[in-house]
Amino acid sequence: MPSPPLRGDSSLSGVPGSPSPSSVCPRCPPGTGPIMLDEVQCLGTEPSLANCSSLGWLRSKCRHNQDAGVICSNGNNPEAQALWTEPGSTVTMEVDAECLPVVTDFIRYFYSRRIDVALPTVKCLHKLASVFGAQQLQAYCAGLFAFLLPEDLSFQTALDLHAYALATRDPTLEELCVQFLWSREKGAAPGDVEGLVREVRFPMIPPEDLFQLQSNLSLYRSHRALFQEQTLQALEFHTVPLPLLAQLRGLNLSQDAYQPRLYTSPTWSWAVARSSRDSSRPSYDSYPYRYGSYPKRYDRYDRYGRYGPTSAPTGYFQTPQHPSFLFRNSRISWTLIYLPTVQSCWNYGFSCSSDEVPVLGLSKSGSSDPTIGYENKALMLCGGRFVADVTAFEGGKAEIPSALNANSSRRASFFPCPAGSFSSFRGVIRPFYLTNSSGVD
């Protein structure tokens, strides 16, 4: 990759990427090809030619007999030096076909130290930067993944990046994609149908839906034995009491198969907005629950008799006590509250410090079963488009992170919310069997 022809002041920073000039080269032969810069004016202290004034890249009014040149030392741009695998005036780059469209921009980056990165190009630019040692560009692209992934509502970008992360053994990118896709399983390889089926948590499927699988799912016929095995496991979970279930063939109830995921259906969750007006509007949360129970709604008065917008955004709902069919007639009542101030915490029976607010509060009422614990979660929703973060309810309260981390003492959300604040919050109930005396409630 030869240096591009330049024209302008002799106090030029070197190229590519502005390594320090060791001396001016007045007798350098004229260059060939397109003239990259013309009318370049530098003070000599600029970190890059891109910081000098000029007519702009590939804009010129001169010829090659007016070229200016410098002899560069190998001091300040290790990224560009990484391109040379052996001494010479040219560089050979082996690039995947899918990344060919961004090669020109990638090469120009070494000269200008500037590059535009968007959702369609971030993967290839990250790949080229990784292969050719452009560590600063690689780190920059890695930092953009969290911003760019939510832009693709089809999830295809996240799936492609996850496969790319596995191929390149990039654990940071892999974890980022896994978080975005809401998946914790890493054992099933693509195309491994049996492995994927085993990742389904059949005990979390209601019995009536289990029996419909054989008629509604074409995959059932080609993997009948596997589905029958998993269905039997689920029916044991739904019909056998806990003491017998724990003894049955040494069944380990702490396995993932017996733990609920983050189910956002009306059966197990409820959402509140940042304002009382939005929280009281009808939504899909008012649909009937699977077992025939309906959530309670208080459109104007809260449970403490407060009226209108002065009350905190609050949601009242009911869930089954446990996913097992044995608890189909048992209900737990929940109250989900957005608490913006210390005073609102006290109004609703929570103890909060000024550093904690705003915070989410969650309380339950009704009879409790000593064999059941809860690991409830709070979802931060950005504009109704995607989940920006997930936090745990501890002591009835869930932290609300900073949406953009703009001069905030709070930790930043896992995925930044461009709006600057979360539009709503969803509480998710996650009951599980307690297998020892210590549990989470």
Image (spheres, grey):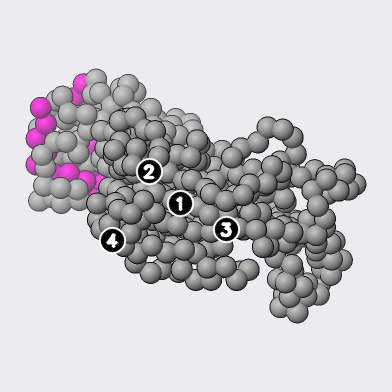
3D distance between C-alphas at marks 1 and 3: 11 Å
Q: Position of residue 363 (x, y in %)?
A: 48, 45
Q: Position of residue 347 (x, y in %)?
A: 33, 42
Please identify the quarter of the rendering in which residue 227 is found. Answer: bottom right
Which mark lies nearer to you, 3 or 2?
2
Q: Residue 277: give its label.
A: 4
Q: Which residue is mark 1?
A: 335
Magenta region: 23-43
Whether tag 4 and tag 1 are in contact, CB under 8 A, the answer is no
Q: Is residue 260 magenta?
A: no
Q: Is residue 166 above or below residue 195?
A: above
Between 379 and 299, the one nearer to me in the picture: 299
Q: Which label's residue is closer to the chain start, 1 or 3?
A: 3
Q: Residues within 10 Å of mark 2 (few under 14, many from 20)?
A: some
Q: Position of residue 85 (x, y in %)?
A: 49, 33
Q: Residues within 10 Å of mark 4 (few under 14, many from 20)?
A: some
Q: Which residue is mark 3?
A: 319
Which quadrant of the rendered structure holds the C terminus? top right
Q: Residue at x 73, y 61 (%)?
A: 325
Which mark lies nearer to you, 4 or 2?
2
Q: Is residue 295 left or right of residue 305?
A: right
